[in-house]
Image (cartoon, grey):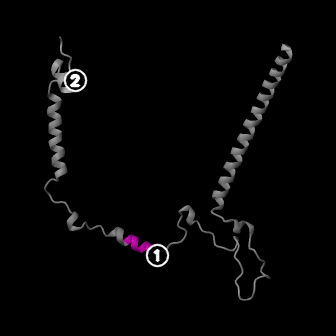
Amino acid sequence: MQPDITKKLAKCEEDLKRWQTRLKKATNKVTELDRLRRRLQAKMGPVSMFDLIGPPFSDKDVGADQQPVKTLADRPRSNAHLGVVTKREPDVMEAAVAVANDLDIPAFLARSDEPQLVDQLKAKRAKQVETDKKKMPLTGAAALEAAGVRRKKKA
């Protein structure tokens, strides 16, 4: 009975190794195809299902009072989803240039010649840091007291 179990176990391990290899290959292929699909969709841009299938009626089905349905090939290509400006709009561009050329600082934002409060505080802090660097470090009981460590009293 023991040799039969050993053979079954060896076959099971062999099959498991073979199927794990196949699983790895299949997973890699699925990942590769998914990445390819994403790249192709990014190149194609946002497209609805209606654009992929086409118009619901042919041109001869459309009545005289209706406009024919535009397909994907009929509509102009827009790169707005890519953040690319394809056409210059003069009124917006001229307004942006006019605002950029107007660099006068309003009176309430203009700084005076006297030093600002922030600069004064920085200078004061720099002096304090320099004096603290020259102080001798605390040692012994003074260091423990400054750190807030309580010492046990000896009985």
Where does residue 94 sit, x and y in percent of width and height?
Answer: 41, 74
Identify the element where label 2 is drawn: loop
Q: Amino acid at mark 1?
A: Pro
Where does residue 12 sit, x and y in percent of width and height?
Answer: 80, 25
Residue 75 drawn above or below residue 152: below
Q: The N terminus appears in which quarter of the rendering? A: top right
The mark nearer the N terminus, 2 or 1, is: 1
Question: Looking at the image, which is closer to me, 112 or 7?
Answer: 7
Q: Residue at x 19, y 60 (%)?
A: 111
Over which residues does the magenta segment extend? 91-97
Residue 130 drawn above or below residue 62: above
Q: Residue furthest toward the top?
A: 155
Q: Which mark is residue 90?
A: 1
* Disc 2 target residue: 149
- Specify whether residue 151 is painted magenta: no
Please indicate whether residue 128 sits to the left or right of residue 106 in the image: left
Residue 77 shows up from this direction: yes
Q: Residue at x 72, y 45 (%)?
A: 30
Q: Residue at x 15, y 37 (%)?
A: 128
Q: Residue at x 70, y 68 (%)?
A: 50
